[in-house]
Amino acid sequence: MVRILALSLALIMAGCHPISTDPGLAFMDVQENVCDRSGEHVEWTSRYYHSCEVKDLINSMLDDSLTLDQVLYIVLLNNPKLQAIYEEIGISQAQLVQASLLKNPVLSLSLRFSSGFDYIIESGLLQDFLDILLKPAKRKLARAELEITKLKVTGEILQIIAQTEIAFHSLRKEIEILSLQREITDAYDASGKFAKRLHQAGNVTDLFLSIEESKSKQAQIDQIAQELHVIKETERLNVLMGLEQGACLTLSDDHFIFQDTLESEDALQLKAIAASIDLQILQLKMRSLALEAGITINETVFQKFELGPDVERKESGVWYLGPQLGIGIPLFDFGYAKSAEFKAKLKQLCHKSSAHAVKLCSEVRLAHFYLINSQEKFHIAQELIPLAEKTTEETLRQTNAMQVGVFELLQTKQRELVAKQQAVHSMKEILIAKTNLELLLRGKMWENND
């Protein structure tokens, strides 16, 4: 019994040296993982910078036109949602420290009087010995939960990076489409005004005039709608960049390098599965579930296992010291139900892992198809533009030669501008599809967390 007391005291002393609550090292693992997967560097701004420093830096960058790299830098530095996500690491680190600490001992004290002036003093100090025995397993479980948290945070960062890339490309392309739409509106407006003059001269019918004026009004409606698209994309980027007051953003013309060659679907699926953060999380959950099962079943079967010294003073004034032990007796609950519960949970995680792999492969195939499909549309649109420009040029020659009218020239020009709009739309689809596929290969599937 003395040896047991000595062992418990040594274990108690070992629990008096907790792990640091500083999540800096855990966050460094996240930084490295994000950099390996995306090439971007993330910062926990609230831990290392003052808000005024961040605002001054961002304001200086907003004065000039922004590249995609600069926008990503601002997002990863200033996005408040990301800063909130980083705190998950601090929470898990604190839980790891808590799992490393022993429970506080319980002190009992009693004073009993006799009919005279004699009294008996009894005191005891009890420590949960089962908690001591299970402490290594609890610490491993908390470490596994911290690893899961780091992977979850990594996945959230990758998703926000992809959202930023799509928002940046979408805004640039919507601005290009708006510029072309304004030219289309001007062309229809000129056609309507010319038709009105001809109508006043009696050269065109009322029907012809109403058709041309309707086209002009519809073009104005389309322009207003496109202006709304630009505003929506601007605000989406403002939110990602954490700009409370919003900003009228000026984006630089990043030159997109078009790559027509893609790996096979099978190769892309294997890469996506190997990189999948969600599959890694499910594997870690299976390991942590085994640790949790051992801890829970032991705590269920042996609900009480306490050990400590007991002191008593008798009437004679003599003090008696000895050990005391409190242990729960497993007469009714042997942990069968808990064991069955954890087995079912393990099977559930296995099925979830299989379902996620199936879904991931499907997402890769869809992203691959969308990318190829948008590339084909872009190629056709690119071939259509010079044909439309040539048609406009030839129509202009015929107009100058009085072989066709001005309306035919304006309609040809309108079709040319529409063809250019289609090319811009196709390029936007390529950029979005490319970003979606890259996100899958970086290890993350799209999730709606709002």
Image (spheres, grey):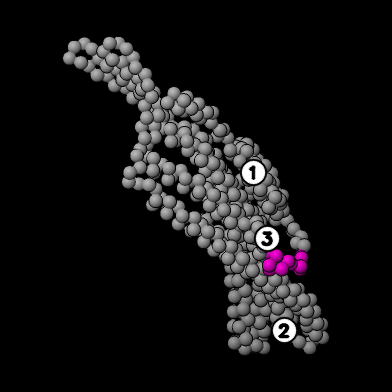
The disc labelled 3 sits on which kind of residue? Lys
The disc labelled 1 sits on which kind of residue? Asp
Considering only order in the chain, which callout, 2 or 3, is on the residue closer to the N terminus?
3
Q: SS of the residue at dot 3?
A: helix
**Counting other residues with Cα less than 10 Å from the Cα at mark 3, is it few (<14), some (14-19), or many (20 or more)?**
some
Q: Is residue 21 visible?
A: yes
The residue positioned 43% from the left and 45% from the top of the image is 296
Picture coordinates of residue 92, whole percent (x, y): 53, 42
Indicate which label's residue lies in the foreground, 2 or 1. Answer: 1
Picture coordinates of residue 28, whole percent (x, y): 65, 41
The residue positioned 25% from the left and 14% from the top of the image is 119
Q: Nearer the viewer, residue 233 or 24?
A: 24
**Counting other residues with Cα less than 10 Å from the Cα at mark 1, is it few (<14), some (14-19), or many (20 or more)?**
some
The disc labelled 2 sits on which kind of residue? Glu
Indicate which label's residue lies in the foreground, 3 or 2. Answer: 3
Q: Nearer the viewer, residue 98 or 179?
A: 98
Q: Which residue is mark 2?
A: 408
Q: Which residue is mark 1?
A: 29
Q: Nearer the viewer, residue 64 or 58?
A: 58
What's the magenta region? 258-268
- Residue 260 included in the magenta stretch of the image: yes
The residue positioned 36% from the left and 32% from the top of the image is 326
Indicate which label's residue lies in the foreground, 3 or 1. Answer: 3
CA gap, disc 3 to disc 1?
22 Å
Q: Nearer the viewer, residue 279 or 173?
A: 279
Q: Is residue 91 visible?
A: no
Considering only order in the chain, which callout, 1 or 2, is on the residue closer to the N terminus?
1
Q: Which residue is mark 3?
A: 271
Picture coordinates of residue 298, whole percent (x, y): 43, 42
Query: Label 1 near label 2: C-beta < 8 Å?
Result: no
Left or right position of 179 against 94:
right
